[in-house]
Amino acid sequence: MNVLEVFVENLCGNFNNDEQIRNQEENGNITHPKAKHINGVCNSKIKNLPKDFNGYFVIEESYYDQGGRQNILPHLFLFTLNEDNKVVLESYELPNNVSKEDFRNDNENLIMDYNELVKSEKFNPMIYNEDNGVFTGESTSMFSPVTKFILKEKIENNTLYVSEIFYKNNKKTFGFEDPIIYKKVN
């Protein structure tokens, strides 16, 4: 397996942070939302992929539950290797004709056209460094002149560590410096 295949194998599956929430409940200090990620390669849902295509499109379904409020945040990512043999994450816009509730890995009717996919202009691609099977990456993106988004990830041993923080006018408006710790459940 090449480094990209190893990365995608570690990234894909069903993950949740139940263990992190249990530990926080035991300590009496819940600081993160209950969350789950369902990550799956979706190349088979994309028509007109070039014959020599060497990347993996991944649907990331993110579900958050905090204070009785539920939030669904699906994403479409492309993972490729750059000239330095490092994994690169690029974000794509969700197709306009699909609701976020329907943008799921298990939606058998979901079909996208490669020629209509639009790369996110706001998201600064993230490059992962790999060291002994541990992948780490960080990206800073300006979503507007006053809105900054910082994403940090570490992937190791069936565990995802994800820190996402939004700043508006240099004030934190959402997110966690301490990462949400997702464990693979299958």
Image (cartoon, rainbow, N blue to C red):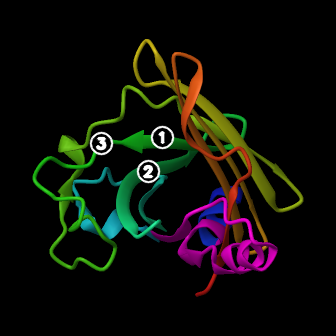
Q: What element carries label 3?
A: loop
Residue 60: % across, % down: 44, 62
For badge 2, the amino acid type reads Phe
Callout 1–callout 2 Cβ contact below 8 Å: yes
Crowd around label 1: few <14 · some 14–19 · many ≥20 (10 Å): some
Which comes before the other along the chain, label 3 or label 2? 2
Which residue corresponds to the image point at 59% horizontal and 64% vertical from the top-left? Answer: 8
Asked whether 167 or 31 is in front, the reply is 31
Asked whether 151 or 53 is in front, the reply is 151
Residue 26: % across, % down: 78, 80
For badge 1, the amino acid type reads Glu
Which numbered disc covers residue 90?
Answer: 1
Residue 32: name its quadrant.
bottom right
Crowd around label 3: few <14 · some 14–19 · many ≥20 (10 Å): some
Callout 3–callout 1 Cβ contact below 8 Å: no
Find disc 3 in the rendering and name its residue: 93
Residue 135: name its quadrant.
bottom right
Crowd around label 2: few <14 · some 14–19 · many ≥20 (10 Å): many
Which residue corresponds to the image point at 26% horizontal and 64% vertical from the top-left? Answer: 103
Q: In this view, does 149 lie above or below 186?
A: above
Residue 179 drawn in magenta: no
Residue 43: name its quadrant.
bottom left
Residue 124: % across, % down: 52, 29
Q: Give the range drawn in magenta.
A: 10-39
Find disc 2 in the rendering and name its residue: 77
